[in-house]
Image (cartoon, rainbow, N blue to C red):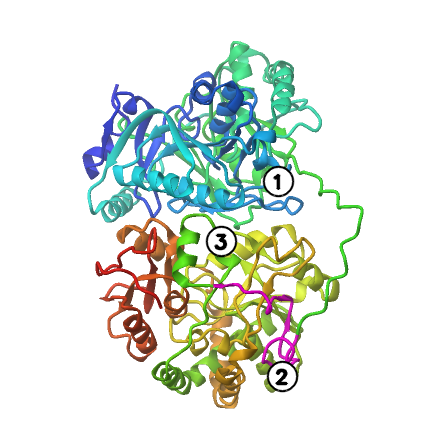
């Protein structure tokens, strides 16, 4: 037998080293993905390679039994299992089957308005990166009884760099801390440095972390693997189209009725309990009998492929298993979002590829989907199993999945599982109290009363400030969230204030042009009477200026409010409730100052999934990260309001979200620093930019005209750059990489900086950055290859006494 990784290994020098079983479990293919060149293709997962359902399910059950033996009966009874979308959804189910008594949930990329998010994380190398956690039971992660939360079992098909698992652990440990985690994978392919990072997290949190896998090893990659991989993909694409095997004309697809039990979830997207598992097992023989009858018996069915659908893997898998037990010659695999090169060679894991349009109205928009190794598999019948949300006209259209399957097999059948959508949670009988009106100046903030209403609560009397070093250590150790305290307000030196004044004088016209452009785009494309809602506080000066532009240019008085959004915790739900009660949500336009890598853009989109009617698209002054389509400019330049903290933002602090201060019916909090009024330049900043509105009016008209016909679709180039920088700098955490002038300034003012990467020749836009870096003893590294003007790096794994990038002890601001 030829190993199915030979073709890639011979051409790119990729090697698998480790346990003898690795080559039996894994092959290699090439991704169409600039983030990672290679793909480890599992032969036992049931995703890309059709496999016996008993083999696919059996590998997961075996892992689950090993976890049960590791935990012991009592701890296993308290455990919960979390699987990863999309490849490991069925594997996680099977692990839960092996544990027997554990409820199961898998992450999803399909938001559901009726289910609030219980968290989320990023899978940085994936083709589709964002994961949501949407349990129907709000206490899912708190299971464990009087003894406290039980072990959390995290299941993925492969454990490679460990970045996805670490992102998950950080998010969930901040929300639901526990003492024991078990990581489960078919293969553990971590390098020693990756294992060290997981061990460091365990040491920081005091949690025990175990890893259970069928096989262990590493992948050895050449230094230039990305460039070589992309060249090889381009060469192969130029030589031949995706190989397809000719077949006889197919008859129309046969629709089979399953008799799926009423009320039984289709899988673990919103949770799957042991009771659900028992109901499904009892129903499987009857459903398998219906399928066999619908196919005309085993002989007519012939060799059958049961093809699942993206995240819907477990239901098709167990249906295939029931057919296997009934005596059919059956294999199992599923469709996928991942674009992979197909090469018809026995030494390559992906021999054939069917491509077709998405057919489930995905939240991230239309795009191609794929079924691998179906064509040429010798199947007489392909039974496609989808959920009802994916049984759309696109599924049945020419060129859709069913039509493509008809080119690969003589007979195609379709079975539809009812998509489980949890009912909206029953509200408490007691109506929530009426929310207070927005706070306004001069009682709260130094802005004019009509400029902005703050949907916040005033925490000015509460001591919330902590030294930067203490906050950084607490946040990175997982013992605190950055929004639970405030950094001590930076008091600028006279030299720094002079730089701010020079920057404002030199860039006021450029700021005015960007303000005018983004405001005109909002008025033309979003709403003729928009309600501006700025994300406090960086977005608030921009919201004030947009309001001033609309009044100056059109005589229109636009409402403007400021609300809080917190990374990892979401947007202030009570503020949204107030907005929905007083304005049409369709008119609300969220406003921010700039994009860095786009984390807040993603956070807002996730948070608004449970608030229908609000448009999650943010309008920003500057979009250097290419994360939005409504912006004033995509240049990464100095926005003077980023130079200072509260003294250019109405004397308002960053927002605060802490359980002992913010109740379930309270707005998030913030402080009004009245004592800094002598240093306040908030109104002066607005006046200096507004004074240039007439001067830039013609340029704005031209920019808006050009923008109307331009392709402004987000490319997320910034996110890709941040991932690259994170890995090349050895940080392995995108949250510690802050791209762009504005974000770099925040790092120097509020965090413990490690070093600054600066584009060579950036000039005056970085004068204040260089001064702050000099004041804090932070090295500045000149680069020629930065997509941003500069990038700030927060000290990784900071503790007091840690050394900076220059080897010297990190000092106070």
Q: Which numbered disc, 3 or 2, marks the residue closer to the eye?
A: 3
Image coordinates of residue 319 in percent, x first then y, are: 56, 20
| Circle nearer the viewer, 2 or 1 | 2
**Residues under labels 3 and 2: Cα distance?**
39 Å
- Residue at the disc numbered 1: 392
N-term mark: 2 or 1:
1
- Of residues 295 and 516, the one drawn nearer to the viewer in this rendering: 516
- Whether the magenta-drawn stretch holds residue 581 is answered as no
Is 658 in front, or is 98?
Answer: 658
The reply, left or right, for residue 670 in relation to residue 86 is right
Q: Position of residue 172 (x, y in %)?
A: 50, 42
Residue 502 relative to residue 150: left or right: left
Task: Give the residue number, with chain letter if any, for mark 3.
Answer: 481
- Direction from residue 270 to residue 232 in the image, left or right: left
- Circles 1 and 3: CB distance less than 8 Å? no
Q: Residue at x 46, y 76 (%)?
A: 641
The answer to whether residue 371 is seen in the rendering is: yes
Residue shown at the point (68%, 22%) measured from the top left: 259
Q: Label for residue 551?
A: 2
Which residues make up the magenta segment?
440-465
Up/down of 751 relative to 530, above or below: above
How crowded pointer 2 is (Cα within 10 Å; few <14, some 14-19, many 20+) is rated as: few
């Amino acid at each position: 037998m030829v190993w199915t990784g030979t073709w890639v290994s011979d051409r790119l020098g990729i090697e698998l080293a480790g346990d003898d079983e690795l080559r039996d479990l894994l092959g290699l293919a090439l991704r169409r993905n600039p983030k990672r060149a290679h793909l480890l293709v599992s032969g036992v997962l049931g995703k890309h390679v059709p496999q016996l359902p008993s083999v696919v399910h059996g590998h997961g059950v075996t892992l689950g039994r090993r976890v049960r033996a590791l935990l012991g009966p009592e701890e296993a009874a308290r455990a919960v299992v979390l699987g990863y979308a999309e490849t490991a959804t069925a594997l996680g189910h099977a692990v839960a089957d092996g544990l027997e008594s554990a409820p199961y949930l898998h992450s999803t990329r399909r938001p559901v308005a009726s289910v609030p998010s219980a968290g989320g994380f990023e899978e940085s190398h994936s083709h589709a990166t964002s994961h949501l956690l949407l349990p129907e039971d709000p206490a899912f992660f708190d299971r464990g009884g009087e003894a406290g939360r039980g072990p959390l079992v995290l299941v993925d098909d492969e454990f490679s760099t460990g970045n996805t698992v670490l992102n998950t652990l950080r998010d969930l440990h901040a929300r639901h801390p526990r003492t024991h985690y078990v990581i489960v994978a078919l293969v553990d392919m971590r390098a020693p440095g990756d294992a060290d990072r997981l061990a460091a997290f365990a040491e920081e949190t005091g949690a025990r972390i175990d890893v259970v896998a069928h096989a262990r090893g590493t992948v050895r990659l050449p230094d230039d693997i990305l460039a070589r991989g992309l060249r090889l993909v381009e060469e192969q694409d130029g030589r031949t189209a995706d190989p397809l095997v000719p077949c006889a004309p197919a008859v129309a697809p046969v629709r089979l009725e399953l008799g799926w039990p009423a009320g039984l979830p289709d899988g673990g997207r919103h949770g799957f309990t042991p009771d659900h598992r028992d109901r499904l097992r009892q129903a499987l023989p009857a459903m398998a009998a219906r399928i066999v009858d619908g196919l005309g018996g085993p002989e007519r069915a012939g060799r059958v492929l049961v093809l699942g659908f993206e995240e819907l893997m477990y239901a098709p898998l167990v249906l295939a298993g029931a057919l296997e037990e009934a005596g059919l010659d059956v294999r199992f695999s599923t469709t996928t979002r991942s674009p992979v090169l197909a090469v018809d060679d026995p030494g390559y894991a992906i021999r054939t590829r069917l491509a077709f349009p998405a057919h489930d109205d995905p939240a991230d928009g239309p795009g191609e989907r794929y079924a691998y190794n179906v064509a040429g598999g010798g199947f007489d019948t392909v039974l496609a199993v989808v959920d009802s949300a994916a049984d759309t006209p696109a599924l049945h259209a020419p060129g859709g999945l069913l039509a493509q399957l008809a080119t690969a097999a003589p007979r195609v059948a379709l079975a539809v599982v009812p998509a489980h959508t949890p009912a909206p949670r029953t509200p408490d009988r007691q109506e929530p109290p009426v929310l207070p009106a927005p706070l306004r100046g001069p009682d709260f903030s130094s802005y004019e009363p009509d400029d902005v209403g703050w949907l916040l609560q005033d925490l000015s009397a509460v001591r919330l400030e902590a030294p930067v070093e203490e906050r950084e250590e607490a946040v990175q150790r997982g013992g605190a969230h950055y929004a639970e305290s405030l950094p001590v307000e930076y008091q600028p030196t006279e030299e720094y204030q002079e730089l701010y004044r020079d920057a404002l004088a030199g860039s006021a016209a450029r700021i005015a042009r960007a303000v005018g452009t983004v405001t005109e785009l909002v008025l033309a494309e979003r709403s003729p009477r928009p309600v501006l809602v700025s994300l406090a506080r960086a977005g608030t000066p921009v919201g004030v200026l947009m309001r001033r532009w609309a009044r100056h240019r059109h005589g229109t008085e636009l409402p403007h409010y400021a609300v809080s959004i917190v990374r990892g915790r979401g947007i202030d739900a009570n503020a949204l409730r107030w907005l929905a009660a007083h304005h049409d949500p369709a008119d609300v336009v969220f406003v921010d100052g700039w994009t860095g890598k786009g984390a807040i853009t993603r956070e807002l989109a996730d948070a608004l999934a449970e608030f229908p009617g609000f448009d999650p698209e943010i309008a920003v002054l500057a979009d250097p990260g290419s994360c939005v389509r409504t912006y004033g400019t995509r240049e990464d330049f100095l926005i003077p309001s980023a130079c200072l903290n509260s003294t250019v933002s109405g004397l308002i602090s960053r927002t605060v979200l802490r359980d002992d201060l913010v109740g379930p019916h309270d707005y998030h909090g913030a402080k009004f620093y009245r004592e800094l009024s002598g240093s306040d330049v908030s109104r002066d900043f607005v006046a200096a930019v507004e004074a240039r509105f007439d001067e830039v009016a013609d340029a704005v008209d031209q920019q808006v005209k050009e923008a109307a016909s331009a392709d402004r679709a987000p490319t997320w180039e910034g996110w890709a750059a941040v991932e690259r920088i994170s890995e090349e700098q050895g940080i392995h955490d995108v949250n510690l990489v802050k791209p762009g002038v504005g974000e770099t300034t925040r790092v120097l003012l509020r965090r413990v900086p490690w070093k600054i990467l600066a584009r060579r020749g950036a000039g005056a836009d970085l004068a204040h950055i260089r001064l702050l870096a000099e004041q804090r003893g932070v090295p500045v590294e000149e680069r020629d290859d930065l997509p941003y003007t500069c990038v700030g790096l927060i000290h990784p794994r900071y503790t007091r006494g840690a050394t900076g990038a220059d080897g010297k002890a990190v000092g106070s601001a």
